[in-house]
Amino acid sequence: MNAFLGVDLSLTGRRWIGPTAEADRLAEAMAQETRLPLPLARILVARGVPPEDAASFLEPTLRELLPDPRQMKDMETAAARFLRALREGEKIAVFADYDVDGGSSAALLLTWLRHFGRQATLYIPDRIDEGYGPNVPAMQALAREHSLIVCVDCGTLSHEPIAAAKPADVVILDHHLGGETLPDCVACVNPNRQDESGDLGHLCAASVVFLMLVEANRQLRAEGTQGPDLMALLDLVALATVADVAPLVGVNRALVRQGLKVMARRERPGLRALADVARMDKAPSAYSLGFLLGPRVNAGGRIGAADLGARLLATTDETEAQMLAERLDQLNTERREIENRVRDAALAQAEERGLDAPLVWAAGEGWHPGVVGIVAARLKEATNRPAVVIGLEGGIGKGSARSVSGVDLGASVQRVAAEGLLLKGGGHKMAAGLTVAADRIDAAMARLSELLERQGAGTGGPRDLRLDGLLLPGAATPALIDEIDKAGPFGQGAPAPRFAFPAMEIRSPRQIGETHLRFTFSDGMGARIDAVSFGAFDGPLGPALSNPGSARFHLAGRLEINTWGGRTKVQLRLEDAARAE
């Protein structure tokens, strides 16, 4: 396939790939048949949507897409045990992971129980002192005071801690990759159990919890009792789905779409307070969940008190919500400073080791375990390879790993753990965690690299830049963006459409802060569009576009609406550029 606009090597070193001739033909046919704008038709064709399904795709409904909860093994048993605890007044504990998915999952259960005037004990382990998932002392302590412990976003691999919870019953609601055997518990609901089909493997833990509550409500209705309004809980499910980087396809897309509508009503005190401290001045989007709200909820588990995020999401007290939101905002600022220091050190180490291997990794003494996952994601993005970043303390390394599309990282980490090179490890396809003895890091990373190479990791250079078509400035209107947004929400597995603007004049370039660039561009026919490129001066885009001279450039990026000072304008979030020959 010829490079789009002839760009074989852009300023960022990528080859541009555009729609095929067949995709163009299908898009034009769809536009004629459905009367949708051609750019939107191109997006639908790229998503594999036929013309007859276009209307339902653009208006996804949970009625059509929500799976029957009973598709998952142990679901009926889990809901029945949960309801028995409710009816009989048993003391319930919720043991949750310390990230957004875990906090949202816990908040779902706490909110649902509150409808019946019941409270549950929230327990979230400290990332540094206890690590991920159930541990024996915590489970034993909870079992002394509670007859039911519900583990959310964790527990599937925690055989010993679950056994230690006797005589309490344990229900697991999780989505992490399961092992060959399951813990000895009342129910383990997990779409990624090895005896599941995998059809629902893309669900985050909060979605699994939501489906358990759907089943609980169904069992209540069979008894003649009305359960809580589950639709009002979808803001939590949407937040978890986006923040946990679950693919926005199928039912996930519908959950996020509906959840954003719920969130826009600003009825949940914690999310309302968090949106205010994050200075969100427009309706929530998948972007704001992933980059504004999610990191702040996560900040407590990363470098502060582990339960802050879950408490914020579950609270009904306005004063507590404001206090927690401000504390999380402060912690997020501290997290960014720590992250920047670790990122610079990790990147330098990885570059020295080499960035062309199947696995990019770095390990350092004293690196905060709360930021190694974010730094691993940065290394992955910079190299288009799976990445592991490990913080060392007392001869033990605690690390996080992030993968690229098409490479199942969780299964490989689990195998290295089973072979004894890791003290423990597990996760899912795109992300994993591990614990390793310092003197075994080299051997463990070599073995992990070998396993990942078998899956094709490291075979490519910088990613090709895939484009959805050409646009001219005069066609990029707010009305077009509104139409395109109907194909959203956009995120993991459903990237926002990216358009190219050919042979543009760069006008009024100016540096913003230390690394960002703003400018306007035009095709010389009158219409102009504002553009912003974040981090442009960390790479080649800033120097090239800030001094364009008389040269014209092909520009590529994603369109968005920028509201400022009461004015609404189209803006291009620039991702790449190439000189127009």
Image (cartoon, grey):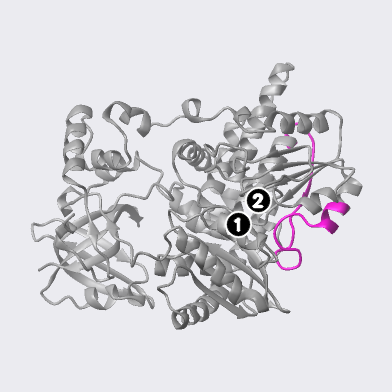
Mark positioned earlier in the residue sequence (2 or 1)? 2
Residue 319 visible in the snapshot? no
Q: Which residues are magenta?
A: 114-140
What is the spatial separation of the Cα atoms under label 2 and label 1, in whole angstroms? 8 Å
Image point (19%, 65%), residue name: 8
Query: x, y percentage for residue 424?
Result: 69, 62
Image point (58%, 69%), residue name: 371
Question: Which amino acid is tagged 2?
Answer: Gly
Query: x, y percentage for residue 122?
Result: 76, 49
Query: Is residue 118 or residue 214 the one in the foreground?
Result: 214
> Label 2, on which residue?
103
> Which SS does the magenta portion mostly show?
loop
Helix, strand or loop status at disc 1:
helix
CB atoms of marks 2 and 1 within 8 Å: yes
Helix, strand or loop status at disc 2:
helix
Question: Which amino acid is tagged 1?
Answer: Val
Quarter of the image with the N terminus in it? bottom left
> Label 1, on which residue?
297
Quarter of the image with the C terminus in it? bottom left
Image point (33%, 76%), residue name: 537
